[in-house]
Amino acid sequence: MRKTLAFAFVAGVLSLAAEPVWAHHAFAAEFDSSKPIRLKGTVTKMEWINPHAWIHIDVEGEDGKVSPWMIEAAAPNSLLRRGFTKNSLLIGTEIVVEGYQAKDEAKRANGSIITFTDGRKLFIGSSAGDPGAAPRKDK
Amino acid sequence: MRHRLAVSISPMVVLAAIFALAAESAIAQPAKAAPGARNWRPSKTPWGDPDLQGTWTSDDCIGTPLNRPANLGEKRYYTEQELAQRESQLAKQQQNDLQELVGPDQRVGTGPPSHWVERARRPCRQTSLVVDPPNGRTPDLLPEAQTRRIPEGANNNNPKADSWEDFSYYIRCISRGVTGSIFPVIYGNGQQIMQAPGYVTILQEMVHEARVIPVDGRPHASPSVRSYMGDPRGHWESNTLVVETTNFLSNRTGIGLNGGGTPTSDALKLIERYTRTSSSELQYEVTIDDPKTFTRPFKVAFPLTQEPGYQNFEYACHEGNYAMSNSLSGARAQEKAAAEAAKKK
């Protein structure tokens, strides 16, 4: 059974490798998987722009110096479909970001996991705002 | 500083693994069509054409591979048992999405995070988007097509990009081509169909394409007129809208998801068929014939659905395409690091 499961898992990985899930661009072209970051910062702006939204935060370093960072988020349309609106993240909110820094070492990162400081996820929802998530009955 | 594992294990991998396991244990049986689908007839527009209007999405087949994994052979559909497993996984995924706290198994990765993607509402019955040839795989490329450069796409983690011109037309926010604009991807799958006497128009959310399709019998434009999205002409066969599109520019987009893969030629001809099979479902099918690129024509098909509350939103792709300059500066940073490493040797 263990062997079968291992085979199934490998087959799954292989089939995913054949058709990976891509966003508008290659993440790894922008961000460096050898530069993991964990940031705690205060939101200064959220850019609701295509093809991806960007969250701007001020992060205080160990030396007390504050630096602006940009965190890449989903496409605005996808955020909206998942129930995330302009009121979901207000300026001045503290958030925690885990991800990877830009390859060119600029203060940009992908937001792989983004939470409020109490641990709640920033992005909650499925196809929120869309009652079609329920099973549909044809007439 | 605490870090989770750098390697992200996507829920899609787990799903694929479950499918592969199920494929071993279950006898392959084609999934049944939706009850009543065969006998359903669409209403007509006031001028007498079948009414296809509404906003449709291919979300239910998000994650279905274009090419069928070779180990599935000619198995076009999942079994009912496999579909039930997938349905249960979708329900679990929805519950996970609604959890307030980050799950203990969530990993930090460089791939698109789970909060980026839109979700299927029900399991896709197909094992691949390609349905003909029977092995569900894109036919081989002709030798002349194998030499065409594939632009740096979203799958290239280390793009060799000296210029924005080296990136795909999708990354450049120009176009995903006709097939790339309707094949299901992780988000932005909306297709709004509107009809008027003599015309069908399809508004595609990503990358804000508008296909205006004459259905009045007029001939194609002159072969000298070429475009990314080609020159479409439609007609009705019973309740099916048939659209033939020709006059494509060569060497722009491919037939892969998001218009990726080997770019097609100026000989590309697409025959699309749109058939409404219920009040909320439409079957889409496209035959891809490019005698300068593929060894034979092939066919892709999948359902589109209408969902309550679902609508297209504007996707002004170039508005803030920071990823373009970020990827170029990333490539320069990599070159610099490689040059410095070489000096030290």
Image (tube, coloured by chain):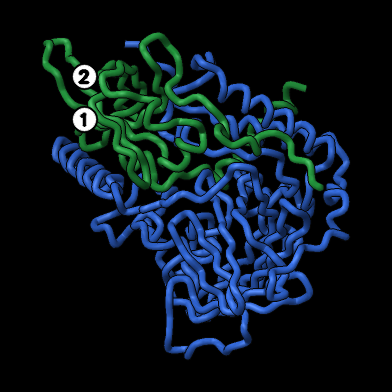
Chain colours: A green, B blue
Residue B30 can be seen in this image: no
Please identify the quarter of the rendering in which residue A29 is found: top left
* B304, B130: nearer the viewer: B304
Mark sitting on residue A134: none
Task: Point out the frontmost of discs 2 and 1.
Answer: 2
Q: Please tell me whether mark 2 sits on a helix, a strand or a loop.
A: strand
- Rendered position, B167 above or below A103: below
- Residue B123: quadrant of the picture: top right
Residue A99 drawn at (x, y percent): 36, 26
Mark 2 highlights which residue?
A59
Mark 2 vs 1, N-terminal side: 2
Residue at figure coordinates x 45%, y 43% from the top left: A77
Q: Residue at x 21, y 19 (%)?
A: A59
Q: Is residue B99 left or right of residue B236?
A: left
Foreground pick, A46 / B177: A46
Disc 1 crowd rating (10 Å Cα; few below 14, some 14-19, many 20+) is few
Residue at 21%, 45% in the rendered image:
B329
Q: What residue type is labelled 2?
A: Val
- Give neighbour class at mark 2: few <14, some 14-19, many 20+ (Cα, 10 Å): many
- Circle 2/circle 1 CB separation < 8 Å: yes
> What percent of the width, then of the height, locates residue A31?
32, 35
Question: Where does label 1 land, which residue?
Answer: A107
x 44%, y 70%: residue:
B147
Q: Can you see residue A80?
A: yes
Q: Which amino acid does label 1 sit on?
A: Lys
Q: In this view, does B72 lie to the left or right of B13?
A: right
- Label tally: 2
Chain for disc number 2? A
User: In which quadrant is the C terminus of chain B drawn?
Assistant: top left
Q: Kindly state the secondary structure of the residue where label 1 is placed.
A: loop
Relative image position of residue A65 (x, y in whole percent): 11, 16
